[in-house]
Amino acid sequence: NDKSLSSSPSLHQLLSQNNKVLPWTKAETDALMELARACDLRWPVIIDRWHSRFRNCPTSGLRKVEDLQHRYYIVGSILAQRRVEVVMAREAANLNGGGGGSAVVVSGSGRAEPVVGS
């Protein structure tokens, strides 16, 4: 559920750490994510629409295309990490709860190997 991921206080803290000079608002981040989706990540189009939308906002108008790209990929990275954590927690609960599935671990080479019972 994307809403629960985006409302997490630690998510906000993680995003704030990366923006000490010119912090991003939630409204700016939401607008950026919507523009990126609507424009299929065509950054010249996104930056043009960004400046049109935020021309009267002193901080948003100062952002360059590199700033928008950085924010977009940081948000995507954090959300992907959170999704993996949720899946891993569910898998761990299934394994610990006797869900009947076979336990596997991923080796350093990226191969899934069965866990041998003790």
Image (cartoon, grey):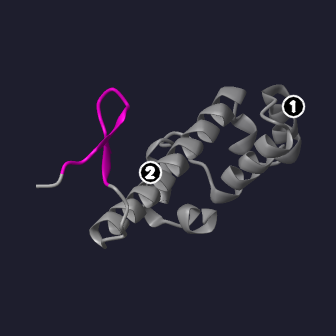
Q: Is residue 110 magenta?
A: yes
Q: Is residue 45 magenta?
A: no
Q: Give neighbour class at mark 2: few <14, some 14-19, many 20+ (Cα, 10 Å).
A: few
At x 32%, y 48%, the residue is: 104
In which quadrant of the rendered image does the C terminus lie? bottom left
Q: Which residues are magenta?
A: 103-116
Element type where label 2 sits in the image: helix
| Residue where numbered disc 1 is placed | 45
* Residue 5, placed above or below residue 23: below
- Between 87 and 52, the residue placed more toward the observer is 87
C-alpha span from label 1 to label 2: 28 Å
Residue type, numbered disc 2: Leu
Residue type, numbered disc 1: Val
Which is nearer the N-term, disc 1 or disc 2? 2
At x 47%, y 54%, the residue is: 82
At x 29%, y 30%, the residue is: 108
Check the image and name the residue furthest to the bottom. 97
